[in-house]
Amino acid sequence: MASIGDPAQAYQVDETGTVALDGPCRARSTAIRSPNGPDRDQRLCIHCKMAVIAPLFSNPVTRTMERANMVCVHEASNTSVSRRDLLHAGVATAGAGSLLTAIPHQAIAAGAASASPLTGQSFGPSNNYLEMAKSAADWILSSRSADEFGVFFPADPSNPKRLFMTSSSPESFYCGIAGMIVTFAELAQKTGEVRYREAAIAGAERLLKRWRAIADTPIPTIDMRWSMIFGVSGIGMALYKVGDMLSEQRFTAALQSIADRIVAAADHNNTKGTWTPFAGYIADSSTILFLLHAARILNRKDYLRTAEMAGDRLISLASQETDGTLAWKGPQNPVFPNLYYPGFELGTAGIAYTLASIHEESGDPRYLDAAKRGAQHLMNLAVGNGKAALIPYALPDHPDVFYLGFCHGAAGTARLFYKLHNLTGERLYLDWTSRLAEGILSAGAPELESRGMWNTVTQCCGVASHVTLFLGLWARYGNPEYLKVAQRAAATISSRSSNLDGKGAKWYMAWARVEPANVNAEAGYMIGASGIASALLHLHLANAGQYEVNLPWDNPFPTKKV
């Protein structure tokens, strides 16, 4: 087969694609091309019948080492062969035949004669997603710290003093304690394990002390202090969720105090924006979403009225496109003021989603009309075919970069079309929800990386957002193919985990696409282990037939299987 032919001087390939390896073990390999993922190499030892699967690599040296690590050394052998032994034996340059010469022939023969075959052993990534979710949470707990405000868990446990982007990051939902405690609380609710409950409560106590100071402190560059991503809306949501899941009324009570503070801060006379000059989800749009949920929970019409007035301001800030659609093009990113980001976090997708949500609560058709015109703008920007579509990351500079995650990609934008279908019943929006989901798969995700899906498995930019999207679609529509994609995404996440220090599962990733060498293991919800743990926990519940989950307030999918 071509996939193994070019670097395989030591391999004898027959017409069936089977490879005979030189050496006394006479292991045989079959190259398998998966339609949904990278090539795989399945090896079957003819003595112990043990099959092992590992990726095929294009680099012949790397491929040889993968084969070396998988050679079967039978149980009866008293000879251990280390990686160092294999390197000294010339494995790295000589191919699979030399590998077997590093193992004494008599040891292999003895093993073949007397060893008990290994059965039931899995050599792939773990699919025990509950245990992996707990392991990730335990890794975060292992860095538990405290200061004058109480307990906290560093966003970057290997560099506890590093602040991500803003001074509010230790408490934010995006990368700080607010997101972490939601995961801890759900793990406590589902497992009954006390350490997660204690951690959730300790973190929530800190947020009760800190939120007022955060509300009083503007964030430089983009003032996100009111938002759900870096501000007090996210803290209010987290406190309510923790209080609700753990029956701790003092935390749910904070919802009213925080909503009152946000309403008091609204400036409806400011033509640039209600709270900030930034209309996107990272700022005013997510603040509106928070007020909509607070209005529903607390039956506060003044919260809804504030959200409606802020929605009116969003509409006034829209760009009227020549094709009759609406777009929200700025200001979005002060660092690159001429770039337009259409996606959920900064641009049209997230703002239109917020307007659709205002209509959902108020019934006012003006907001739905604006949301639909924003959605049409995104459809006009999309690239693809009748089955699959993606929307460029940033225009005009990056028309050929297509993010696949939540922040700027299809996993986030699909939420808008899903919500519009729920609100209107129009087939057009269901079709576009499906097209964006298919676009993710057409780009090679969840297994393969691309220009818009790099070394990240997070909820923000990465593979965890695919678990969330496809689980949500499965929960709503019941298509088992959606569940299979979520399972594939979880397997990809599992395959990239690390626990060499024994402290728990973690993922070393590049937060920034353009800085691939800047790798960290983060703990936060949107960019780290707590959000990944949440996705894995939810998949475990789906697999177990117990799907009832807790979702952030920007997620429109069902919390139970429909």
Image (cartoon, rainbow, N blue to C red):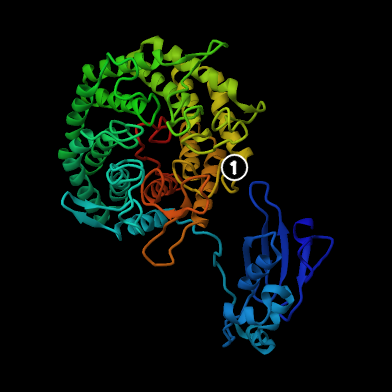
Residue 251: percent from the left, percent from the top?
18, 39
Residue drawn at the location 40% of the way across and 41% of the way down: 547
Q: What count of labels does the image hold?
A: 1
Q: Crowding near pointer 1: few (<14 within 10 Å), some, many (20+)? A: few
Q: Is residue 288 above or below residue 200?
A: above
Q: Is residue 341 above or below residue 178?
A: above
Q: Quadrant of residue 25?
A: bottom right
Quadrant for the C terminus in the image:
top left
Residue drawn at the location 81% of the way across and 60% of the way down: 16
Residue 530: percent from the left, percent from the top?
37, 49
Q: Residue furthest right?
A: 15
Quadrant for the N terminus in the image:
bottom right
Q: 119 or 280: nearer the eye?
A: 280
* Label 1 secondary element: loop
Q: Is residue 308 left or right of residue 22?
A: left
Q: 520 or 186: nearer the eye?
A: 520
Residue at mark 1:
451
Residue 308: percent from the left, percent from the top?
31, 15
Q: Is residue 66 left or right of residue 558?
A: right
Q: Is residue 98 left or right of residue 298?
A: right
Q: Quadrant of residue 553?
A: top left
Q: Quadrant of residue 244?
A: top left
Q: Is residue 357 visible?
A: yes
Q: Is residue 116 visible?
A: no
The amino acid beneath tag 1 is Arg
Q: Is residue 460 above or below residue 90?
A: above
Residue drawn at the location 46% of the way across and 47% of the way down: 511
Residue 399: percent from the left, percent from the top?
61, 31
Q: Is residue 464 above or below residue 283?
A: below
Q: 418 or 87: nearer the eye?
A: 87
Q: Is residue 33 left or right of residue 505?
A: right
